[in-house]
Amino acid sequence: MNGIRLIRMLALGLNIVVGFASLLDLGYIAFYALGAYMTALPEVLRHMVEPMQRQLFGQVVTDTEVLRQLLLGPTMVMIMLTRPSGL
């Protein structure tokens, strides 16, 4: 249900921007795709890193949440550094 709501909001935003305002600005779709990619990346890393950790150390050393925080921390720093001045 959450996926349907997200796509519905994306379609509504596209309808407002293109339909009512007659502008073709697809920048928010790029941010939607970037958010989807960054959300899926820790899961992909978990499936790649856990078997290697089990082979090397015999157990899982780094949890999925730690990988997620390691990705979110630098992402937030980059957002803060590249934000427009005055905001």
Image (spheres, rainbow, N blue to C red):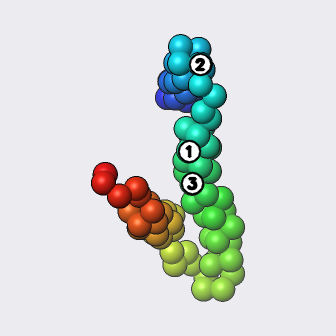
Q: What element carries label 1?
A: helix
Residue 52's x, y, as percent?
Answer: 68, 77
Q: Name the residue under label 2.
A: 22
**Residue placed at 58% from the left, 40% from the top?**
27
* Of the image marks 2 and 3, the number of the one nearer the N terminus: 2
Q: Please name whichever residue, 5 or 47, is drawn nearer the observer in this view of the structure.
A: 5
Q: Is mark 2 on a helix, strand or loop?
A: loop
Q: Is residue 39 visible?
A: yes
Q: Quick one: which residue is furthest to the top in this view?
A: 20
State left or right for residue 31 relative to residue 84: right
Q: What residue type is labelled 1?
A: Phe
Q: Quick one: which residue is furthest to the bottom in this view?
A: 56
Q: Please name whichever residue, 25 or 73, is drawn nearer the observer in this view of the structure.
A: 25
Q: Name the residue under label 1.
A: 31
Q: Can residue 43 be seen in this view?
A: no
User: In which quadrant of the rendered view does residue 19 lie?
Assistant: top right
Q: Which amino acid does label 3 sit on?
A: Met
Disc ID at residue 38: 3
Residue 82's x, y, as percent?
Answer: 45, 62
